[in-house]
Image (cartoon, rainbow, N blue to C red):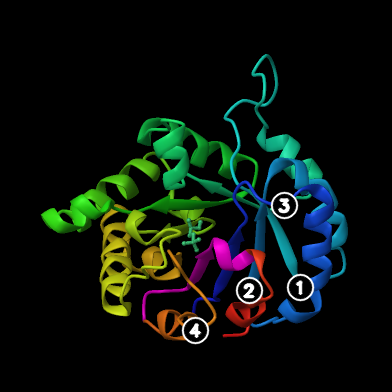
């Protein structure tokens, strides 16, 4: 039985003081020990959010990281900085990073391996554009992203990763994928992982759905056989996030 993960991705929202207020407003209501709750927050919010979340079941995640430990990489954050600050998860390869910051599969694979090396749990994002869905290449495209992300990752390490399937056309648009569409791709990702590793390993890796998840659609999505929770954007910034955690 895979334990569900409900992760919020705050994206570029919340100043440090707003962040602390949000955690304080939400923490009592997300104390659902039946699921893993992760707040992935902007780098500047990590330290105050870790502090505000102390004594709760909230794990703190980063939205990004670089692949070096330290040095002349102006503006970047290293995995060891994240660990030292109390971070446990890190989002890798969100479509916004792929699109706006030109992060490609090869670079993202390096990030996945670096995160694992530092015992950070990578939340590995994948997902197709609307054009790709309309062309009927969704499953092959996503398979390519998964194969690239896990290149050189052992089965034992893969167990400490999470996949987030996020169709790009459903992100921030209010257009949620139907449960059938989401389940079809998540099931296909599990098959891809089975091909890369084995059935046992694939059956243990959590696969999340992301894209306009809200308090009303979460329960139906999370009831699907291969959907082990959600990566939530907009709704993670509102009291509604508690309804998703307690779906
Ligand atoms: O990482 C989260 C996703 O991009 C989903 O964002 P959204 O819930 O605002 O559609």
Q: Is residue 162 visible?
A: yes
In depth, the one of 19 and 226 nearer the eye is: 19
The residue range painted magenta reads 225-236
Residue 131, given in percent of the width and then of the height, sits at: 20, 51
Residue 16, given in percent of the width and then of the height, sits at: 81, 48
| Left or right, 203 with reference to 19 | left
CB atoms of marks 4 and 1 within 8 Å: no
Mark 4, Cα crowd under 10 Å, few <14 / some 14-19 / many 20+, is few
Residue 93, given in percent of the width and then of the height, sits at: 45, 43
Image quadrant where residue 3 sits: bottom right
**Residue 213 forms part of the magenta stretch:** no
Identify the residue at horizontal 27%, vertical 78% (top origin).
180
Whole-angstrom CA distance, mark 2 to mark 3, is: 15 Å
Q: Residue furthest left?
A: 135
CB atoms of marks 4 and 2 within 8 Å: no
Q: Earlier in the sequence, mark 4 or mark 3?
A: 3
Mark 4, residue position: 216
Q: Earlier in the sequence, mark 2 or mark 3?
A: 3
Identify the residue at horizontal 45%, vertical 81% (top origin).
217
CB atoms of marks 1 and 2 within 8 Å: yes
Relative vertical location of residue 21 with respect to residue 220 in this rendering, above or below: above
In depth, the one of 24 and 160 nearer the eye is: 24
Q: Which mark is residue 97?
A: none
Mark 2, residue position: 241
Whole-angstrom CA distance, mark 4 to mark 1, is: 18 Å
CB atoms of marks 4 and 3 within 8 Å: no
Mark 1, residue position: 26
Secondary structure of the residue carrying tag 4 is: loop
């Amino acid at each position: 039985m895979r334990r569900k993960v409900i992760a919020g991705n705050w994206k570029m929202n919340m100043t440090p003081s707003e962040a602390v207020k949000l955690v304080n407003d939400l923490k009592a209501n997300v104390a659902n020990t039946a699921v893993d709750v992760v707040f992935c927050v902007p780098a500047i919010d990590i330290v105050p959010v870790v502090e505000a979340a102390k004594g709760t079941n909230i794990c703190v995640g980063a939205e990004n990281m670089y692949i070096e430990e330290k040095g002349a990489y102006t503006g970047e954050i290293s995995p060891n900085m994240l660990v030292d600050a109390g971070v446990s998860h890190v989002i890798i390869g969100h479509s916004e990073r792929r699109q706006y910051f030109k992060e490609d599969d090869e670079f993202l694979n390096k990030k996945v391996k670096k995160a694992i090396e530092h015992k950070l749990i990578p939340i590995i994002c994948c997902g197709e554009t609307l054009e790709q869905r309309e062309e009927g290449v969704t499953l092959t495209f996503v398979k390519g992203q998964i194969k690239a992300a896990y290149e050189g990752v052992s089965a034992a390490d893969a167990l400490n990763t999470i996949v987030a399937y996020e169709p790009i056309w459903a992100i921030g648009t209010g257009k949620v994928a139907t449960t059938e569409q989401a389940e079809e791709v998540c099931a296909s990702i599990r098959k891809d992982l089975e091909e890369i590793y084995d059935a046992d390993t694939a059956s243990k890796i959590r696969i999340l759905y992301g894209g306009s998840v809200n308090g009303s659609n979460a329960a139906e999505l999370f009831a699907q056989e291969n959907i082990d929770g959600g990566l939530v954007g907009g709704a993670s910034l509102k009291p509604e996030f508690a309804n998703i955690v307690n779906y």
